[in-house]
Each structure stands twice: as C-alpha cells, then as structure tokens.
Image (tube, helix red, strand yellow):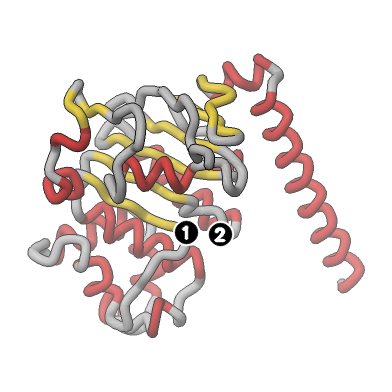
Amino acid sequence: DDYVLKGISFRIEKGKTTAILGGSGVGKTTLIGLLMRYYDPDKGRITVDNMALWDIRRKDWHKLISIVEQDAYLFHDTVYNNILYGRPEALKEEVITAAQLAYADGFIEGFSDKYETVVGERGIRLSGGQKQRIALARALLRDPEISILDEATSALDSESEQLIQKSIQELRMRMTIIVIAHRFSTVDIADKLVLIEGGRIVEEGTHSDLINKKGIYERYYHLQYRNNREKTNLGNNQGDKNG
C-alpha cells in the first residue's frame, strides 16, 4: 500500500565515497537492490552518466560492481581459492595484492598453510573480521569501478572495523565506493553522507556539515558515540573487578 522509498533523489559522484545511513527498515536494502538492478523502480529512474540504468544490460552493469555484505559467504575451500573466486583468471600476484589491499595478507601469512589454509564451511574456522577481509579481497580482485559495502563492518570488532576503514581510505579515488551502514562510526571517511528515515532523505552533506547543522545526524552520531563509550567503560570496570 505504500512505497518503501519516497521522493529519493541524490547524486553519487565518480571516484568519491558516499555513505547511506539509517536504521533498520528505512529502505537501505531496497536502495541497494535498485542500484544492483535486482529490480527496477516503479516510479522515477536511476541514471549513469545521463543514461537510464535499465538501458544498460544487467550483465554489463554487474561487471562494474563488487559488493561485500554483512554476512560474507565463504566456500569450504582454501583462502586462495576463496579470493580467486572474484576473478578466476587472476594471477597469484594479483590475489596477494588484493589481500594486501584488504589488510588480509598479515593474518593469512600467520596461518601454518598460509594461502592454502582451508577456511571450513562458510568460513567457520575464521573470525568475523578475517572473513570480511577475505570477502573484501575477493571483491577488490575484480578491480571494480564501483564497490558497495553493505553493512560490511556492522558485526566486527573495533580493530577489524578500523582496518577495513583504512582499506577504504586507501582505495578512494581508485573507485567509487558506496557504504551502507547504521553505525555512524564507520562513515567519518565518506565524502558525502545521505541519511534516510522512513524511506526519505532527511539530511545530506559531509560529516562536518551535518555535525555543524546540529540536526538528526548530529544527535544520532553523539548518541552512538556516548553509548560506545559507556560500553567501553563498562568493559574496563568489569575487567578491574575480575582482576
């Protein structure tokens, strides 16, 4: 009876990092589905260099895009083959370079079998951060023009999140990056933020612009920051008690 997205209109600039923010159910997943052309909009249109997206063949469009999702799927195979899946014809040197860009090479080299380590079904033998960095390496091996990180850091520890953020910073200008998130700590590095509520864009701009505006973004940002700080203090106090 109602549209998930209502009056959405914004520009994603080539070679920039755009973060799309909002809580659960605001339309972020629908927006990604539209960008990936899993389905087309009932009204309005999406354009790429002034060309309607539906005039581009899905197969050709998907060649330009890589996506890393929150629950990255790894095969019951070696680390090397899981990365190679992104581009099966890639050379070994390219696989290693992709792993280095994703800050995965360090922990991979720490395994006794290194890149020949079998990760287990769905990567069960790896930590969440290791899985995500291998998934990011697989996506980067494709050398995409557009990379989408769909809640890719939402379930990670702070160290893994910071490493992926560092990787994003180093990839800026090499590709167009779209970050989907509900944790505002992951998007400070974005060139532009788009905040969605109830299927509508409520605020848009840089991190500094929206903080200075003292609107919805500024309120949510500081609320999350305060909650994270309280959790850290709680953990430290518990550690003192245990000690």
The residue under the point 22% across, 39% down is 145
Name the residue nearer the viewer: 232 or 46: 46
Tell me if label 1 and label 2 are in contact, CB under 8 Å: no
Tag 2: amino acid: Leu
* Location of residue 146 with respect to 102 vertically, above or below: above
Q: Residues within 10 Å of mark 1 (few under 14, many from 20)?
A: some
Using the numbered discs, state the Cα–Cα distance from disc 1 to disc 2 in whole angstroms.
9 Å
The quarter holding residue 13 reads top left
* Location of residue 175 with respect to 97 vertically, above or below: above
Image spot of residue 76 (x, y percent) = 32, 83
Give the farthest residue toward the front: 1
96 on left or right of 208: left
The residue under the point 73% across, 48% down is 228
Q: Residue 70 carries which label?
A: 1
Looking at the rendered structure, the secondary structure element under dot 2 is loop
Looking at the rendered structure, the secondary structure element under dot 1 is loop
The residue under the point 39% across, 44% down is 32
**Mark 1 / mark 2, whichever is N-terminal:** 1
69 on left or right of 79: right
Tag 1: amino acid: Gln
Image spot of residue 104 (x, y percent) = 37, 62
The residue under the point 51% across, 57% down is 160
* Location of residue 20 with respect to 231 vertically, above or below: above
* Location of residue 99 with respect to 206 vertically, above or below: below
Name the residue nearer the viewer: 226 or 20: 20
**Which residue position holds label 2?**
156
Q: How crowded is mark 2: few (under 14 residues within 10 Å), some or many (20 or more)?
A: some
The quarter holding residue 120 reads bottom left
Quarter in which the C terminus is drawn? bottom right
Image spot of residue 74 (x, y percent) = 35, 73
Image spot of residue 226 (x, y percent) = 78, 40
